[in-house]
Image: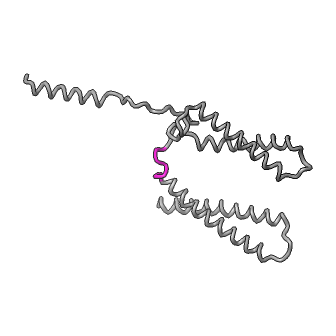
Amino acid sequence: MTASSHNEINQSQTHKRATTEPTTEKQPRTSIWGTMTVFGGGRIALWCSSLAIGCVGGVLIGTIGTFLRNPHQLDDWTFVILMSFLAGGGIFSVAYVLLVDRTTITGNIPNPEENIESQWREKASWASMTGMLLAIAAFIFLVAFYDKPIAPLVVSSGLLAIILVGLLSGLFAYAIVRKRDLS
């Protein structure tokens, strides 16, 4: 055996070993709830920061709500505590969703913006926003030129109609875009 054939055997064994050995890069642990924050902390940092944001946000909303409420219903501290618990859970959830690292969630899509469903939702959201803006413009036009006093029920019904127009236009636009792209 010559020296060149020994080199070829060593190179092929090295190449074979390099392709079969597992990579040394550590992949993040995943779970259905996520295990890391966007800024690099672990699960405890994720929960603690989300909880802190939820508590502070809940107390702020509760405090602001005391100035906007009917003073004859509850005393101030009871109202602040009640509103803090009610709003704090929602703010905690939003903070958790914004802080969790997407790569640590089980079954995540690497590039969701390239997904076809994301493109359908984006087009549908534009249609929904357009529908809501048209409904808001029509509602403001009607209210501005109506000379008689308007009952609060009419205003509430109008705002509910605006929300329904936005939702329905988004649903219909999603169905139309999806059907057009699939056929």
Q: Position of residue 97 (x, y in %)?
A: 60, 43
Q: Quadrant of residue 128?
A: bottom right
- The picture places residue 154, in percent across and down from the top left corner, at 81, 66
Q: Residue furthest top?
A: 1
Residue at position x 63%, y 36% from top? 49
Image quadrant occupied by the N terminus: top left
Check the image and name the residue furthest to the right. Answer: 72
Q: Is residue 14 left or right of residue 41?
A: left
Q: Against 169, is 12 above or below?
A: above
Residue 110 seen in the figure: yes
Q: Is residue 69 left or right of residue 46?
A: right
Nearest the eye: 51 or 64: 64
Residue 93: percent from left, percent from top: 66, 42
Corner quadrant of residue 160 = bottom right
* Residue at point 75%, 47% (across, down): 61
Q: Residue at x 16, y 26 (%)?
A: 9
Residue 118 appears at what percent x and percent y? 52, 53
The answer to whether 67 is drawn above or below residue 96 in the figure is below
Query: In screen coordinates, is 48 left or right of 182?
Result: right
**49 to the left or right of 29:** right
Q: Nearer the viewer, residue 83 or 27?
A: 83
Magenta-tinted stretch: 109-115
